[in-house]
Each structure stands twice: as structure tokens, then as C-alpha cells.
Image (spheres, rainbow, N blue to C red):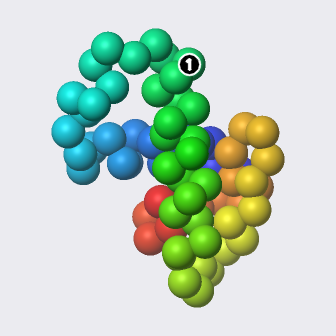
Amino acid sequence: MTEFQVVYDAFLGKILEDEWNDWDLEDIETDWHTLLMGAIPHFKFPRVSLEVNDEGFEDDLNNEEI
């Protein structure tokens, strides 16, 4: 299983976080989750399942999927 935070951390390492400076943590995590769920359908030919549960991805993602 790969927790959502692992993917969020990889995402945050590649962008400027200025947009979320004045947001509450709960709103930030909701926004990140919305972005992630919107991106999953655009990932073509994953080598592992991208099925999710409440805590993260059901399979272990490798660096390519993350």
C-alpha cells in the first residue's frame, strides 16, 4: 500500500506551494486529493493497480506511478 502523503510529497517537491499559504490544513489536503483523483485517469498503462481506499493506493506504487 502507498499512502497518499507519499504522492503528495513528490508533487510538492516539484511545484511552488504559495497557493496554499493562507489555507487550513484540512482544505489543503482536500485540494491535493482532488488534484490527485483528477490526474489518475490520465495515467496510461500503469504497471500496478491505481485503485484507492481511504488511506491511499491499494498496491505499492513505484517511482513511475508516484
Q: Which residue is drawn at 61% across and 80% down?
A: 47
Please state which of residues 62 and 19 is positioned toward the viewer in this rendering. 19
Q: How many marks?
A: 1
Residue 25 vertical placement versus 16 (above, below): above
Q: Pointer 1: what residue?
A: 26
- Residue 61 falls in image quadrant: bottom right
Q: Is residue 62 visible?
A: no
Please state which of residues 37 and 7 is positioned toward the viewer in this rendering. 37
Residue 15 vertical placement versus 62 (above, below): above
Q: Can residue 50 be seen in this view?
A: yes
Tell me residue 14's x, y (percent).
24, 50
Left or right placement of residue 41 versus residue 58 in this view? left
Q: Point out the residue furthest to the bottom here.
A: 45
At mark 1, the secondary structure is helix
Left or right placement of residue 1 versus residue 41 in this view? right
User: What residue type is disc 1 on?
Assistant: Glu
Q: Residue at x 56, y 59 (%)?
A: 38
Tell me residue 43's x, y (percent).
53, 75
Tell me residue 65's x, y (percent).
51, 67
Q: Which residue is drawn at 74% across and 54% down?
A: 52
Residue 45 vertical placement versus 16 (above, below): below
- Residue 56 falls in image quadrant: top right
